[in-house]
Amino acid sequence: MSFEDYEETHPLDNLILSERMPHIWCPGCGIGIVLNCYLRALMESGIDLNNVVVVSGIGCTGRIANYVALDSFHTTHGRAIPVAMGVKIAKPHLKVVVISGDGDLFAIGGNHFIHAARRNVDLLVICVNNFNYGMTGGQLGPTTPFQSITTTTPYGNIEHPFNLPYLATAAGAVFVARWTIAQPFALIKTIKKAFQKSGFSFIEVIAPCITLYARYNKLGGPSEVLKYLLQNSVIQNGMDPAQVDIDKNKKIIVGEFIDRDRPEFVKELYRIIKEQSGLELKSIVSGG
């Protein structure tokens, strides 16, 4: 085969909408690594891709829904989880995954997150946490570390941020984990494990916003931030989520924190419908 006949391919080509490239993410942004890990976990899990749905909200991470060659939905701001719930309830056999950012999921979308976890709906929620509103100018968000600099906190953030794994655990999630983009193989393994859970699973991924948060807080460029995340992360599997809050002056605790079982909402819903009506789940879904 001559050089002219050679066509370069990538293992994930069939999962990416190449016609929508180049993407909008800034050089050094960690969202691309999260997307790569998610797609590799899908491939390695052997899940039927026809049964996978990706739902994203608004923001930098929300653009993931536009780039994947899977059934996807790019929702309005903060509404990724209720849309995903609707998909899962209507078609329980689908593997529904929400991938969105910290602002979308925990500011305007925070109430939806709490109640979906409380109900234990069978969803996997992956939150890319870059500590600010990256798409709209680098403003303070619900996960911005205390005393950090943003465009709306030029003298340092005086608000205390959410501890996302603790919030997810307290609300009722059955699987809770956190990694940074500096641990991609661990993240892939954890996503694959979350695919096997029945119930509400949550994975937080710490990723840099190079253009805004990292610049304002003098963390350096992409390579420096990646090295910082690797050197300042401590793996503590099984750690009490109440103890994994993020402090800019402390190490970032990562790992798989919670793995438990609770009755799952959709299964319980269809069980009741079947008991009261005598209809099989297939008949309910098809409307027959």
Image (tube, helix red, strand yellow):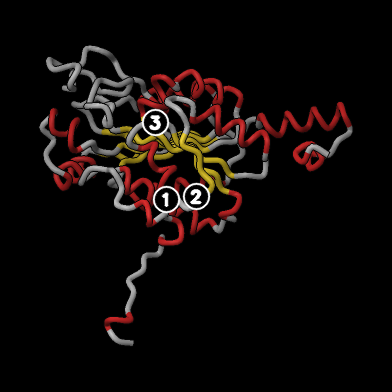
- The image's mark for residue 188 is 1
Of circles 3 and 1, the one toward us is: 3
Asked whether the residues under the numbered discs 2 and 3 touch, taking CB atoms below 8 Å apart as contact, a structural biologist would say no
Residue type (three-letter) at the residue carrying disc 1 = Ile
Asked whether the residues under the numbered discs 3 and 1 touch, taking CB atoms below 8 Å apart as contact, a structural biologist would say no
**Residue 193: percent from left, percent from top:** 51, 47
> Observer-nearest residue: 221 or 250?
221
**Residue 283: percent from left, percent from top:** 82, 40
**Residue 165: percent from left, percent from top:** 42, 28
Disc 2 marks which residue?
A: 192
Per the model, the C-alpha gap separating discs 3 and 1 is 24 Å
In this picture, is 129 found above or below 151?
A: below
> Observer-nearest residue: 101 or 264?
101
Residue type (three-letter) at the residue carrying disc 3 = Ile
Residue type (three-letter) at the residue carrying disc 2 = Lys
> Observer-nearest residue: 105 or 231?
105
Please, what secondary structure does the residue beneath circle 2 have?
Answer: helix
Please, what secondary structure does the residue beneath circle 1 have?
Answer: helix
Disc 3 marks which residue?
A: 58
Per the model, the C-alpha gap separating discs 2 and 1 is 6 Å
Which residue sits at x=26%, y=31%?
134
Residue 98 lies left or right of residue 214; in this view the side is right
**Residue 31: percent from left, percent from top:** 32, 43
